Image (cartoon, rainbow, N blue to C red):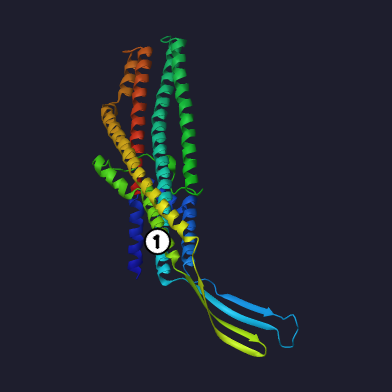
Amino acid sequence: MKRYIILTATLVAMSAAAQSPIESILQSVANNNNDIKATQQDVAAVQTELSAENCLENPTFEFEYLWGEKQVPGGNKYAFGIMQGFDFPTVYGQRRNLINAQVALGNAEMRYVRQNTLLDARNLCIEIVYLNKQIRIVREREKIAQALVDMYKTRLENGDANQLELNKVEIDRLSQSSRLKMLVSQRNAAVANLVACNGGIALPLDATTLAQYPIISMPGSLADVTAQWQESDASMQMIRNQQQVAESFSSVSKQGWIPRFEVGYKQAYEVGDMFYGLAVGVSLPLFKTNNEVKTAKARALSLSFQADASKAEIAAEVSQLYNEAVALNAALEDYQLLTQQDNRSLLTKALESGHISLLEYMSDIAQLNEAEENRLLLEYQYYLTLSKLDRNNL
């Protein structure tokens, strides 16, 4: 038994370690998000209510007491009865089908809320990774800019530089410092939104340490991902379940032509004698059922049209996201050379050795910074697009 406990604890620890930081955050959000919890409780309440609707109605108790105008001794009458109403057995079967369809719809709604909540949380994680990458490179730029300021102060003291050059590097250092503060502020806002998504509970790890984007594979082909979306997309499943509910409701409405019954026991006293017996009642559906059937059929037809429209919209959305991901991936490959070269250090050494002027350095470093920021933006947009494409796996 002791070995079993140790083995179980080891497996749990290994499983937790195997999770990536973003997966750990998403697991926490799935457990703590208030919207997910509220939807789960709503679905559970609706399922309980639906089950109660298919039970027998409460029995009816009746009591009558009548007295005559002539006040004849013993001429007053009273009666007592208990009645139980019920539907024809096939009605309960159709209602059970309707309840099952509504339960499936509730589960689809819960999956829809969970999927969109986790997608928002993962996109916030991707944004934080993007901001962390920017913060890291801007801090490096700030250090380089501060080193240049120190170098030109020394050169100015030695007469090898002028005040204008010192002002330029001071402005660059100030620009990097201001940008760093702005990025940190944006990251703090994103982390706050992620904590709110986690139900206001502290995250299982420090989100400011997120350094890697989630592992999301690029779909094999547009046809494959389109078929997968049309089959498993949460919004599409909700419409299918709504269709099933409408069709089941139509079947229940058709059963409305079957009369309802009441059976019970009655006891009455009249003119010194007691009467005992059974009572039977029948409710004839003459007016309401026809309109209910027409409404249910119209609703089912409307949802059928909605399903066709949603299927076309999903195909268009998938096509847009897939083509955007392909284009972003191709653009990122063009920037691979930038990540393989340390041009910033080369420029700094060239400036220190006097091979290039400060003006040339500032021009080249600005171009390098722009290219680096474009690469980071493309990478962020690429993973954000992949995240949207992968939402049905959440």
Q: Quadrant of residue 363?
A: top left
Q: Quadrant of residue 134?
A: top left
Q: Quadrant of residue 250?
A: bottom left
Can residue 185 be seen? yes
Quadrant placement of the N terminus: bottom left
Q: Residue most toward the right?
A: 71
Placement of 164 over or under 10, stated as above or below: above
The residue closer to the viewer here, 190 or 182, is 190
Percent x, y for residue 182? 48, 30
Percent x, y for residue 367? 35, 20
Percent x, y for residue 148? 41, 19
The residue closer to the viewer here, 57 or 50, is 57
Placement of 214 over or under 173, stated as above or below: below
Q: Secondary structure at mark 1?
A: helix
Q: Residue most toward the bottom?
A: 272
Q: Residue at x 31, y 41 (%)?
A: 315
The residue closer to the viewer here, 199 or 367, is 199
Can residue 23 be seen? no
Say whether residue 319 is left or right of residue 97. left
Percent x, y for residue 280? 52, 78
Label 1 sits on residue: 251
